[in-house]
């Protein structure tokens, strides 16, 4: 008899796993695991933590004496790099490939665990030589190249804190993040390739640094070979530093012993104010959470080739390109460029070329590729695939079915994982042995207690829409907002006592399956990228012609959601088509190309509350031709 999920058979459009999938799954009985974790949360997580290496074992699994400032694996001494690298190079895995990288132009570089360990040690020594030590921040602003991974690991190895800023962000977004983090060093590159074009990252860094008290050093990786300005005494080439006699000859660097609760990284994410908000993750609990979820959900085996198409600059890349796969000793594929460059089969060519077996991507990418038809994937042998995944936004059932049929050939379950920068790890997610429903992220991961509640904080009835909340702590949870603990409490834990508010609306059906609807706060998810209305609006008003602006997200066929802006011009400015183009270019320059609004509408006034807060809900209702009441009372 097959194991699989023993809960009652889910209803609706369902896809049950084959006997083969169940037989080889790391978790053959998800229901049993869920039961085990719900009966004893601490014992469950302790068991998972024991699969990893610790310098000193923890005294207590969970300390909840100062809610919502939870602590995990209290008293434990560790370093995530000891698990991601050091322990592998002591075994046969030293010869296993950790990373297979392909540039947009087709260049290939591979790193065994041994090679990765060596490069990381060398770069750790470079950082040390620049005076970076435990607790210092390092900003990493890079294209999708191996040095991004090396820089992150090198920073963590010496106990410093990385702050990766997505390479698609631009001048003002970068400036704000460098300034707030007070980084000592910035690691960047001369540029990166995207769609055949060069994104000149160093130039953006130079412009950002003109607006801020400069960090002491800028390290520049040569990738495109394009000429860049180098400021003497501040800017250094990565390859020069890596071949300094001291660095070249000392290919070792001790891994700093950290407290389980010491910070590992900060990651800026959009919030409801213009001030950047950095989420803090720590070494101990985070490593356990990302490792366990990766192993259980993506069912990783020694012989797998894993490909997460995300960018390391977002949490998906942190957790599931860098840390979880390395901790699990997996082989990852990483690709620098655009999915459609030079042709719409680039991704499928990569799957075939490297024999990718598990692939994790976004609904936007799937919808974008779907547009070109199934002839493109059909040109390639995709038979190496056994499991697929989706993240970042709700996946519409049509895209799900296309992915399932044309890419997975109806034999690869799709893991639609719901989680956030704040959660660090998958929270609501299927596992391969579970029955799937297209469009539903299915059920909470073992130990996770998720629910959908109404305004009053009470669970709503099955099928009804409400706020998504989490009722129990989890090891990879954010610990605080960097330099702003009050904001941590206020944003996440104050709406309902004892519950974490995710900022999403959702429904739970009669089978306990969750259906995520979308954001209910001032966050817009464009192509799965998380942007804040406040940051966008402040970029608008930094243009000399703009007096005031409001942005909302409206449904978009490919991007899921696209930005629509309302702009009040200053008295001396005139409304023209060129001004529209100029404003779009201004937003791309200040925030980044992903933030470019789809449409801009000039208006005379904006609906506001008495206290002067823009009522985006009203704007949205009008734009969608709905009654303002139709949008429910979910939004403030
Ligand atoms: C959305 C990305 C539906 C959601 C890992 C969440 C999803 C926000 C899903 C976090 C999913 C993420 N289905 N919606 N499977 N995964 N989201 O911080 O709105 O960039 O709150 O983390 O993405 O975005 P973030």
Image (cartoon, rainbow, N blue to C red):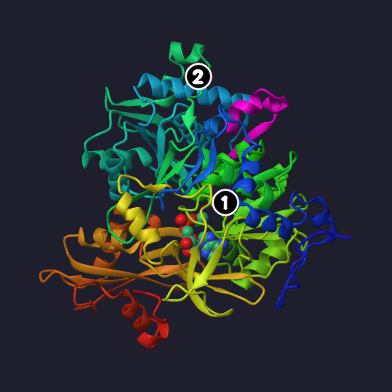
Q: Mark 1 near mark 2, Cβ–Cβ under 8 Å?
A: no
Where does label 1 land, which residue? 342
| Depicted 159 relative to depicted 65: above or below | above
Q: Is residue 441 left or right of residue 553?
A: right
> Residue furthest toward the bottom?
627
> Residue furthest toward the right?
1
Q: Nearer the viewer, mark 1 or mark 2?
A: 2
Q: Inspect the magenta stretch and tell me whether residue 84 lies in it.
A: yes
Label disc, if present, on residue 516 of the rendered structure: none
Residue at 47%, 30% in the rendered image? 258
Q: CA distance from mark 1 to mark 2?
A: 41 Å
The answer to which of 260 and 525 lies nearer the viewer is 260
Residue at 38%, 88% in the rendered image? 627
Where does label 2 land, which residue? 253
Q: Provide residue 444's location: percent of width, then percent of height.
A: 61, 61
Q: Inspect the magenta stretch and tell me whether residue 374 lies in it.
A: no
> Residue furthest toward the left?
572
Extent of the magenta region: 83-106
Residue at 41%, 81% in the rendered image? 631
Looking at marks 1 and 2 on the same chain, the residue that comes earlier in the sequence is marked by 2
User: Quadrant of the image for the N terminus?
Assistant: bottom right
Q: Provide residue 117's location: percent of width, then percent of height.
A: 57, 25
């Amino acid at each position: 008899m097959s194991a699989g999920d023993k809960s009652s058979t889910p209803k609706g459009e369902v896809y049950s796993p084959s006997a083969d999938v169940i037989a080889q799954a790391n978790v053959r009985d998800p229901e049993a695991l869920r039961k085990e974790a719900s009966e004893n949360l601490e014992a469950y997580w302790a068991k998972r933590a024991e699969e990893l290496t610790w310098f000193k074992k923890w005294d207590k699994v969970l300390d909840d004496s100062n809610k919502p400032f939870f602590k995990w694996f209290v008293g434990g001494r560790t370093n995530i790099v000891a698990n991601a690298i050091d322990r592998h190079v002591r075994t046969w895995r030293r010869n296993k490939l950790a990373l297979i990288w392909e540039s947009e132009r087709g260049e290939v570089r591979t790193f065994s665990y041994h090679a990765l360990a060596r490069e990381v040690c060398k770069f750790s020594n470079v950082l040390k030589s620049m005076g970076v030590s435990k607790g210092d921040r390092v900003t990493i602003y890079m294209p999708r190249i191996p040095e991004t991974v090396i820089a992150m690991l090198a920073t963590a190895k010496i106990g410093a804190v990385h702050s990766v800023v997505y390479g698609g962000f631009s001048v003002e977004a970068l400036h704000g993040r460098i300034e707030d983090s007070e980084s000592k060093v910035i690691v960047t590159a001369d540029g990166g390739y995207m769609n055949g074009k060069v994104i000149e990252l160093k130039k953006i860094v130079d412009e950002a640094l003109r607006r801020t008290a400069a960090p002491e050093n800028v390290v520049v990786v040569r990738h495109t070979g394009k000429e860049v300005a180098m400021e003497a005494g501040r800017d250094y080439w990565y390859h020069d530093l890596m071949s300094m006699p001291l660095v070249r000859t000392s290919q070792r660097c001790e891994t700093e012993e950290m407290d389980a609760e010491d910070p590992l990284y900060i990651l800026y994410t959009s919030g409801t104010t213009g001030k950047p908000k950095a989420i803090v993750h720590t070494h101990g609990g985070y490593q356990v959470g990302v490792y366990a979820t990766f192993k259980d959900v993506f069912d990783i085996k020694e012989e797998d080739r894993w490909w997460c198409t995300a960018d390391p600059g977002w949490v998906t890349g942190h957790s599931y390109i860098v840390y979880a796969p390395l901790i699990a000793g997996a082989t990852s594929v990483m690709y620098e460029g655009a999915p459609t460059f030079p042709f719409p089969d680039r991704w499928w060519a990569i799957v075939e070329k490297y024999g990718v077996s598990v692939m994790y991507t976004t609904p936007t990418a799937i919808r974008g590729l779907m547009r070109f038809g199934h002839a493109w994937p059909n040109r390639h042998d995709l038979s190496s695939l056994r499991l697929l995944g989706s993240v970042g936004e709700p996946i519409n059932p049509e895209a799900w079915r296309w992915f399932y049929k044309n890419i997975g050939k109806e034999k690869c379950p799709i893991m639609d994982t719901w989680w956030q920068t704040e959660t660090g790890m998958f929270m609501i997610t299927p596992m391969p042995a579970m029955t799937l429903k297209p469009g539903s992220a299915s059920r909470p991961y073992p130990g996770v207690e998720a629910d959908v509640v109404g305004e009053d904080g009470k669970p709503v009835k099955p099928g009804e829409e409400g706020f998504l909340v989490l009722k129990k702590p989890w090891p990879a949870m954010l610990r605080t907002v960097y330099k702003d603990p009050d904001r941590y409490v206020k944003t996440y834990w104050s709406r309902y006592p004892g519950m974490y508010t995710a900022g999403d609306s959702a429904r739970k059906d009669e089978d306990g399956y969750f259906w995520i609807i979308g954001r209910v706060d001032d966050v817009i998810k464009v192509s799965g990228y998380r942007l804040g209305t406040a940051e966008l609006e402040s970029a608008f008003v930094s243009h000399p012609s703009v007096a005031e602006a409001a942005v909302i997200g409206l449904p978009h066929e490919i991007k899921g959601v696209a930005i629509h802006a309302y702009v009040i011009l200053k008295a001396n400015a005139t409304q023209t088509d060129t001004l529209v183009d100029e404003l779009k270019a201004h937003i791309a320059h200040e925030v980044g190309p992903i933030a470019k609004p789809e449409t801009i509408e000039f208006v005379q006034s904006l609906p506001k509350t008495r206290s002067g807060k823009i009522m985006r809900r009203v704007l949205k209702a009008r734009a969608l031709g709905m009654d303002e009441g139709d949008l429910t009372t979910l939004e403030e």
